[in-house]
Image (cartoon, rainbow, N blue to C red):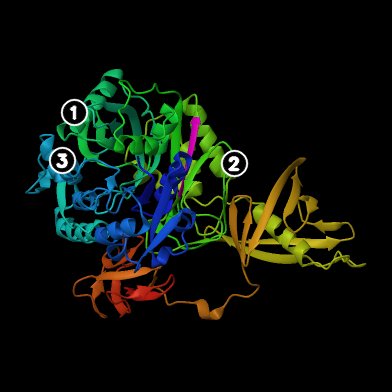
Amino acid sequence: MITSVLVANRGEIACRVFRTCRELGVRTVAVHSDADANALHARVADASVRLPGEAPADTYLRGDLVVKAALAAGADAVHPGYGFLSENADFARAVLDAGLTWIGPPPEAIEAMASKTRAKQLMGIEPLTEVTEADLPVLVKAAAGGGGRGMRVVRRLADLDAELAAARAEAASAFGDGEVFVEPYVEHGRHVEVQILADTHGTVWPLGTRDCSLQRRHQKVVEEAPAPGLSAELQEELSALAVRAARAVDYVGAGTVEFLVAGGRAHFLEMNTRLQVEHPVTEAVFGLDLVAEQLRIAEGHPLDTDPPRARGHAVEARLYAEDPAHDWSPQTGRLHRLDLPDGIRLDTGYTDGDDIGVHYDPMLAKAVAHAPTRAEAVRKLASALERAAIHGPVTNRDLLVRSLRHPEFTAARMDTGFYDRHLADLTEPSPDPHAPLAAALADAHARSRPGFGGWRNVPSQPQTKRYATAGEEHEVHYRHTRTGLEADGVRVVHADAHLVVLETDGVQRTFEVTRYGDQVYVNSTALRALPRFPDPTAQHAPGSLLAPMPGTVVRVAEGLTPGTPVKAGDPLLWLEAMKMQHKITAPATGTLSELHAVPGQQVEPGKLLAVVTETS
């Protein structure tokens, strides 16, 4: 019987596995890098072991150090989570060779399926070896790992070599394996997958379908179970193919078989030999704890002959610290508050006061809603996200709410090109027009002395406050009177330092106001208080390229030096942040007049990287 489990991972998945272990009375052991010394997963575990360093290659990808940590902490089993070493057959063997229980599939099954090229060959599919114009568009894909890293869509043959190089670098950084391959890119397909669970006694459960079509950078954003709108015949075919793939490699444990569905046909993508990020929607629909089932299977217990029946519908949204309106750039900083309404499952690796760093994936949490019908589950999740208090770095929350309410999604007509078509509309700024006024009134009340309302016996001049939100500036005016605060066109029903009630056309609305320095949150609107006079030192020359995020300069375009002519959209350099590479392009056609970026250089947001002087 398993008594102590080390999770060879970090963040949300480590916390999620620990939760089940505590419910089962199993002790927990965490591993943490120096960057994660104070991370939530390290704090909530019964014991934690340091992996010296910060980069994944020096810490979470070091299987030898993880095995030593398990032995040192007295763990008798290892759960790999997802990402990092979860699909590494050598790591699984090292765990078993150390006399520990491996909570996952046999190394041979991992070996057969963890490489997407070998998995396709096993299913009778060969990758492209010679790409021609007739093959376009194609998808460059990492052979190992997942999460969209090492994936590139190529629509021009001239771009293929550069995208192969970028994919190799990204895959090597994320998984320690730079192998990539090329396959046809299926346009307008839906990403559908089947959860499987298999024991050591020959039983394989296909646990329904999931739709994961809403993706950015080939990484899933919204997932749901069951996948809507599939015919009974196609559902049966998908389940049969998933069971076939599992039996082909004598699979054991939890796994996922992924497909692209287009034109009523299923195209096999890969088999992920691990638990998936989106597993909670399957748990909600089938009433299961998949981590508990993983532990039971690792202990040798058999599954029942038939899986439980599915009930209702579940939808999951991944909350990322990123700015979708600016090329999905990851964000860092202090997470002051993360709070969702009751009735929503929240899986997270962060809590109030934690810092979001630059070293790892920018996912903050997963929010999951379950209801009797799809429409009810979608409505429930969208409302909860809209009402959530998320104070800290910029997130994709507004994008998630709009995505869940988009007619293409509510009608279940989405595909993997959803964000390619709709991103501009989904990220159009739409701040609450009364939020800046509420912030100003709360601030005015907070600054007034006790017993002194700020009013005079003569008419007062309007007070002015300026705020910025979503790239726009807002100026609001109010005045102190004998009876309190007044604002043009709006009746101030109540105002204190944290709560403002405004009435317009007979309708009252309540605004909760929270401050962190110059950052102000009014309900779900984030504002930044602006100084009365702009800082003249904050100006940059036209054509300046500033670092959009903290990261590392990993590459500068070949032959790029000051004086080089460039065209608008030309890639100039690449930044790596949170395990993803981000391309910095020329903003206009002209000449590169300054180049400050150097490969290996660490940069902070706003750092001047280069200047392009536009051709007149």
User: Residue 600 appears in which quarter of the rendering?
Assistant: bottom left
Quarter of the picture containing the C terminus is bottom left
Answer with mark 1 or mark 2, whichever residue precedes in sequence. 1
Answer with mark 2 or mark 3, whichever residue precedes in sequence. 3
How much space separates mark 1 and mark 2, taking CA atoms? Answer: 41 Å
Q: Secondary structure at mark 2?
A: loop
Most frequent secondary structure within the magenta stretch: strand
Q: Is residue 553 magenta?
A: no
Asked whether the beta carbons under mark 3 and mark 1 sit within 8 Å of each other, the answer is no
Provide the residue designation for mark 1: 244
Provide the residue designation for mark 2: 341
Q: Secondary structure at mark 1?
A: helix
Residue type at the position of mark 1: Arg
Stretch in magenta? 365-370
Provide the residue designation for mark 3: 119
How much space separates mark 2 and mark 3, taking CA atoms? Answer: 42 Å
The spot of residue 360 in percent (x, y) is: 37, 59
